[in-house]
Amino acid sequence: MAQPLVTRYLDHVRFEKRLATRTVTLYGLDLDRLEQLTAREGLALDQVQPGHVRRWVAQMHSAGRSARGIALILSGWRGFYTWLGREGLMTTNPVSDVRAPKATKPLPKALSVDDAGRLASFDNPQANAWLEARDAALVELLYGAGLRLAEVTGLDVLAAPAARGWVDLQAGEAHVLGKGSKRRVVPVGRQAVQAVQHWLQLRAQNMPDSDALFVSQRGTRLSGQSIWKRLRARSLAAGLASAVHPHMLRHSFASHVLQSSADLRGVQELLGHANISTTQIYTRLDFAHLAKVYDAAHPRAHVKPTGSK
């Protein structure tokens, strides 16, 4: 049963602050947890110190609660103690300087080399040939050159002073305008060059009134949202286990190049990252890949330690 102070506080946020019923319920659950923790240590709510809160945070974290979940709990406790201070019942807020553990940055999702190849080489004979050629060229540039979605949509057919980007088929290069309006030149492989050449041949049949390399059937520059939808449908039609989005192909490009070359600086240049720290996340992907290879292939990977039974 909630202590009188907790009941008063929940009435305050319910009737005076007019918070949503669900929010009030969640606050109540967070404060129930606080009451259980203080009771376990023989503390009154107004006797809690920052050291107590830090220890409880550490306990929640070691028990597997997420950083975001802990942050929400602390937010509820912080609001309660702020209210106690306004009521003249506390002189300091024991939660004010306590922060949740830093959330780990999730690894970007990347396709396996086989799945990336299957998507790039996928050909649906039942599909519209014009759309099929366009989508194949899109996949080749997103995966084969590691371009961002905005960089692909910004490509024009011809190089021009006002163009945001273009593909030089003879040189095998893509000139793109990346983040921060920084231009860079990215190598384009033979498969991508052939796919773009094929697309340009079919693109001309519609004679679109647009400078854009990739256009819709209406002749307008293809939007990022349309590419998302087309790529999702293509990946599912190709039999991949999960739908693919444009940035996943960029991640796949980066991780596959790094696996083969181990050249982090080179990958940074190819991706157009301003800071090497942004690129370093791919070393985690690379290590995960190498660990799997080691576990599967190395004769010492599964040797039991001496003395084990």
Image: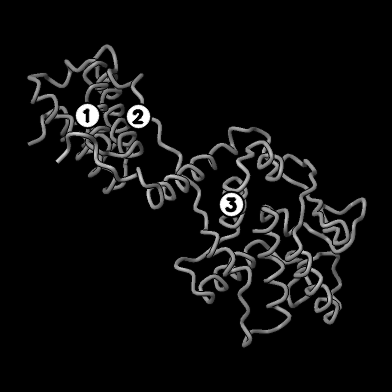
Q: Earlier in the sequence, mark 1 or mark 3?
A: 1
Earlier-in-chain disc, 2 versus 1: 1
Q: Secondary structure at mark 1?
A: helix
Quickly name the residue at label 1.
59
For residue 251, above or below residue 157: above
Quarter of the image for residue 91 reads top left
CB under 8 Å between callouts 3 and 2? no
Amino acid at the residue labelled 2 = Ala
Task: Report how far apart the C-alphas of labels 2 and 1 lie in the structure.
Answer: 12 Å
Q: Quadrant of residue 232?
A: bottom right
- Report x, y in % for residue 1: 7, 36
Quadrant where the image shows the C terminus: top left
Mark 3 or 2, closer to the camera: 3
**Which of the pair 85/180 is nearer the observer?**
180
Side of 307 relative to 134 (left or right):
left
What residue did someone put label 2 on? 100
Estimate the x, y position of residue 75 in percent, counting from the top left: 33, 32
